[in-house]
Every structure is written in C-alpha cells, then in structure tokens.
Image (tube, grey):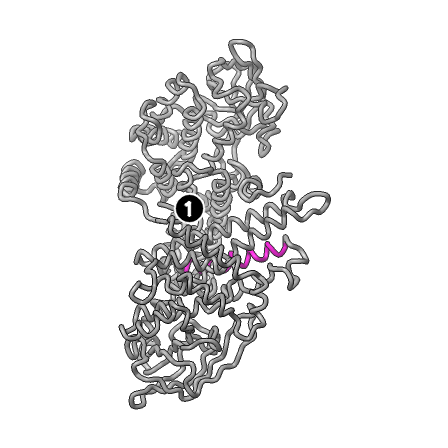
Amino acid sequence: MDFALSEEQEMLRNSARDFLTKECPKTLVRQMETDEKGYSPAMWKGMSDLGWMGLVFPEQYGGSGMTFLDLSILIEELGRALAPSPFLPTVVYCGLPILAAGTEEQKKQFLPGIAKGDIIMTLALTEPSATWDAGGITVKATAEGDDFVISGTKLFVHDAHIANYFLVVARTKEGKRKEDGITLFLVDTKSPGIKLNPLKTIASDKQFEVVFNKVKVPKKNILGKLDHGWSIIQNLVPRATLAQCAYMVGGAQQVLEMTVNYAKERVQFGRPIGSFQAIQHKCANMATDVDGSRFITYQAAWKLSEGMDCGLEVSMAKAWVSEAYRRTCAEGHQIHGGIGFIKDHDMQLYYRRAKASELAFGDADYHRELVAQQIGL
Amino acid sequence: MDFRFTEEQDAFRQKVRGFLAKELPSDWLTGGAPEDETDEWWKFTQRFLKRIGEQGWISATWPKEYGGQERPTWEDAILGEELAYWRAPAQDYWFRWKMISALLLNFGNDEQKRRHLPGIASGQVYWCQGFSEPGAGSDLGGCQVKAQDKGDYFLVNGQKIWTTGAHRAHWCFAPLLSDPDAPKRSRMLSMFLVDMKSPGVTVRRLESLEGVAHLCETFFDDVKVPKENLVGERGRGWLAAMALVNIERSGLGFASMPQKILEQLVEYVKETKVDGVSLSQNPLIRRKLAEMAIEIQVCRLLAYRVAWVQATNQDVTSVGAIIKLFGSELMQRVVATGLEILGLYAQLVPGSKGAKLAGNITRDYMWNLSLTIAGGTSEIQRIIIATQGLGLPRM
C-alpha cells in the first residue's frame, strides 16, 4: 500500500498549481460568473498548451496516455482554483465516451481537436424529470433516411452556449427495460432547430435548457451502437462522478487552508481565534473530512485506473465527499464569521459551488441507495 | 499510489485468519465467548496470548538481535486488524506489548532489552500502563506520583489510575515525577519499569458499567524501584510517553471491528421480517447501513494511511490523532445505529434469552464509551490535529 503521489503526479500537480495560481486568480473566477462566455479563452488555450485536455487520450489522438488517477489529481487542482472552464464537460463527459465507444473516424474527428483546445463539447443527458436513471430519457430520436431527427428538452446542460458539439442521450426505441432503446448522438450545436434557454444557478456556472425541435443528425454521428447507448453512459458515470469528487476534494482542501490561515491571523480577546479550542476543534473536524474525502476518492480513482470493479467505491466516494465538502464549507464560514459571506470574500465562491458539485451525478442520498444495493441489501 | 496489499501481506493475513479460526471456538462471535474477566475467560485468554507469542507475532518487527524477525510493520498492522475483526480476547494486552516493546527498543539500554523483551515475546509476561493519575488525565505532564532518588533506588509514592489489567500484570511502565525542580514541566518526569510484586504496590479493581472489573487503580506506598529500572534519560519520561501514545492511537482495528458489526447487521436485516416485509427493504434501514458502510470505508483508509506513515518512518502524531478521533467516534455511531435497528431487542445483554446477535452490540454500547476517552480524549485529539497538524497556535 502506498499513499504517496508518484514523481510524475507530483510534477503534474505542481505545474497545475503554478499555472492556476498565475492564470486563474479569484478575480477571474468572479469575472467569469457574470461573463457571457463564462470562461477565459486565453486560459483555456494555456490549459491545452500544457496538455491537460489530452492528458488521458492515447498519443495517436494528440494525448499523453496518462491514467484516470493522474487526471483526478489535475481535476483536484481545478477544484482548488475553481477554474471556470468547460474542462469536465469536454474532456470527461464527452471525450472519454468518444474514446471508449467511438469509431476510429470519430476518434480522429474529435479527440485531437479536444486535446488542442479547439473543440468544446458538452453532455446533454438530464431532462426536466431531473433523474440520473435511464428512465429519465424521453428526448426522442426518429430515423428519417440517412438522418435521425431529435426532439425534446434537455435540462441542466453545462456550457451549451460555447459548445461545438453536444453528446445527446436520446430514446430511439421503447424497449422492455428502460435501459434499452437509448442511443447517443454527436450533434453539431449549429444544427437548425436547437434553442438554448439559460438557467440562473447557485454556482453562477453556465447551464441551459436545450430544446431540440426536429434537429437532424446524420446516422454516422451515432456514438456506439443504435439502441444500445446506455452502456456508454454506465461506463461514463463512474468517471464523471469521480471527476466531481476530485474537484470537490481540491475545493475542500483550499477552504481548510483559507480557514486555518484566517484563524491564525484573526485576533479577538487579544489573541488569535485559532488558539481557542472551539475553533481548533472545528478545524480538526474539517481536516478529518478533507483527508477522508481525498483517500476515498483516490482509492476509487486508483481502482478505476487499474481496471478493477469500483462501482461500490465510486458511490461511497460521492456520498461521502458531497457531504464532507458541504460540512467543510459550513465550518469554514462559521470560523470566518460575517466577512465570509460577503461577496468580496472567496469563501462564498466555494460554498455555492460545493452545492452544485454535491448535486452533479447523484447526491449523497442517491449514492447511499446504490451502496445499499452493493453491500447485499 | 497503490491501495493493494502485496501477495506476501495477503498470505500473512490468511495465516492469521487460519490461526484465529483454529484458536477461537466457531461460535466465538455468536455467543460462545466467555464473559470478560471470569476464570474461564482468563484461562482461555492466557492460552490464547501464549499461542500468539508462539507464532512469533509479538516480536515479529523487532531487530533480530533481540529475538525479532525484522518483519515489516505492515504485518503488525494486519495482525491488529484481524484481531479486532474477530474480537480476539484481551487485545489491550497485545497493544501494551507493542507500547512497552517500543519503549524498550527505542529508549531502553541493552540490559533492559535482554531482561524484558523475551517475556513480552512469549506472550506470558503481562504489563500494565501507569500513565493517568487522579489529578493527571488529559494533562499527562502533571503526573504527581513521586520517584525520589535514594542513591541505589527510587522511592515511589502516589496513585495511578486506569492501569487496566494491573490486577494480572507482572510489570508496569510508568512516567513518574523524578525531578520536580526541573525548569520545564516536560523535564520533570522519568519513565520507570515497576515490578508489580514489589512491596508497597496495591491494586484496586474498578468495575465499569458493563459489569467488568479490569480497569484498576494502583497505589504505590514506599515502593523501592531499583535504579536500573529507569528507562532512557532521566527527565525525558514525558517525551517517551508521547511517543508511546502514538502507538496506542494508531490501530487498524478501528475499521475492522465496525466492519464485522456491519456484516452481522446486513445479515440480520435480511433475515428479519416485520409484518411480512424484510427489514432490508426498509428505506431508513438501507440508508443507515449504507452510511455505516461508507464511514467504515473512510475509517479503513485513514487507518491504512497511518500504517503507511509508520512503515515509511514519517511523523505519525497528527494522522494518528485523526484515526483515533474518527475511529473511536465511528465505533460509537455504528453501535448506536446497530441498536436502533435491533429495536426492543437492543436492551438484551449477552446471556439473556432472546438476545439478538448474542447481545454483543448491547455490550459494545456499554463499554465503547471508553473509546473516546482512553488513549486521549476526542477533545485532546482535535487539539493535536489543530496544533500539530494544522499549525494553529496553542492555548
């Protein structure tokens, strides 16, 4: 057993932290909350120059062939910096499914472009029913000659306004099981019949309702097999879920550090508040939550990277980290007192995003039920 | 990063399991274990501890020159994990052997090592820990039991408390006040080995709420402790004590004991029907047990992290405090949840007609109060994490 990062992972983490400290100050994070695009193309370019978008793609697709665990370490740094970028939707939610299920032609069409930072993509999975289960897929795609025609409404689609392509999860057939008859489509966002309605979110991230009104997609843009697309989503979900966990671990670590630093500096009753046991105990609870979050995430990501079964570990991680991050933010706020919830302070940036990450790919209740099923209940 | 045990470590675990399957009766966890501190229990326990010694497991990590095999510390950790999972008897004896042998190996002189280590390795010489006093609990630096230098010997007077197992112990290791005039409190104590057969040593057993009397008070009344029983440098007893509590706090058993309870509860709710419906279908129970499984997983990783920190010779103080804090509080949550699930049956103790899961969880509910107190309270652990781990200023 070895809890240490490899030398390569240390280098990746350090270079990510250096880059993000320089290129992603909190002024940028704040600015992007109200920016129309919601991300900085200059920073995006810098990220691709460092090879981040292609990190886990094989070399022949412009990547560097690193592991999912390596990617998790990078994502942790993105979460620490709250880097506003379409990184997770593009690389994790769409790039990985294309790598796993795409034809050679599709891989060549998309992966090098993603790696270079030229293609932004996003996943159109959830609908107004707001469930993560296959039963929630009602957007229909009907065959018409060489095309499919997609109609229906997707909700909570990230970065839809800047994406070049959607990965749309649609129902092509009513099957016996709700998992049957689902197909994935790579849809050019400029196709006629697509309408975007922006949502206003707690994290001030860019999410949309995407309405498909008879949108034509060529059959060659099906990802994977017709009517058998759900297995691709099942393969993606643990990866996307762990990416969220890693993102939260980074954020929680930063909240802990900010809070400890504040407790050392803030003086009341003639001494730093961090010398009071009431504050020390809270900080100790935060440290325990953060360590637990990191290891439960790393272990699942390591198992995934090693090709082992990790369904149980992934759900355990998401259930734990979702709530631990929320607790860490809440304790951090309590220690910061009034100043922490003023918009100029960084704490509130984390508090709001913690809620968003908690919800993404299943909250703690959702994953606890999955855990229950996997421990024999 | 690698979360696998090596083949060699897995093989060692299997060996331990094989041993325990042979040494513990098959109904050990389902009602067959004798009540703690009864004659039957002690007879069984003595034999069991001796058998552990015979495997070479107590001394496995020691240097060869003192009878050890220089095995990696991971094996010790795995042994502890399995002992806790199977609820092997008198694990506190095993822990104290770890502490006293670490004390001797790190601070003792050659003669002390040669004199005491073989008995420890054999699993037949019992030690108690003389740390706390009525007036010195969390504040261990405030120990007041005096050890006056009388030339050839130290004259010891005063009272220790929570000297668990003192009524059966042959020896006691204890920080005593040898230098009350030292300029710093941390230089006032020295670590001593006290022969429990010395004239003037009296042990009084304390009965705790579950009805077991193994916590003890030990009184020293003009006890002569020979000079050669001073361990390490005089005035450095507090330092040695701090090194030992780190060992006390870093067990893998924190995760494996609740793991067994979880497994038993999962079986129980699957087999138990209320109004014709299996308890395992009850959403509230599913949620509780899932949460329990998740918290145990976190605990296991925090425990493995400590074992890794120890195996790689890094400072264990803060991470040891984290596992002690999380593990002890987790065990209390697990047991409380277990009793919620047992409903009315939760009040039945071992031996009662109708007791579920042999009444073991109810017994755990009574003794596990000590977990968040013994070996440093949760509050002390939090202060250690905050000051030593996070660098917050001291009071």
Q: Position of residue B376 (x, y in %)?
A: 53, 37
Q: Quadrant of the N terminus of chain A?
A: top left
Specify the principal SS of the magenta part: helix
Identify the residue position indicated by label 1 in the image.
B255
Q: Position of residue A15 (x, y in %)?
A: 45, 55
Q: Nearer the viewer, residue A151 or A130?
A: A151
- Quarter of the rendering containing residue A109: bottom left
Q: Is residue A75 left or right of residue B155?
A: left
* Rendered residue at 59%/54% (across/down): A331
* Rendered residue at 39%/52% (across/down): A9
* Rendered residue at 53%/30% (across/down): B162
Q: Residue furthest right?
A: A269
Q: Nearer the viewer, residue B266 or A185?
A: A185
Q: Magenta residues, as a range?
A: A315-334
- Disc 1, SS: helix
Membership of A321 in magenta stretch: yes
* Rendered residue at 60%/62% (across/down): A348
- Quarter of the rendering containing residue A239: bottom left
**Relative to A68, residue B230 above or below:** above
Give the letter of the chain under mark 1. Answer: B
Residue A29 appears in the figure: yes
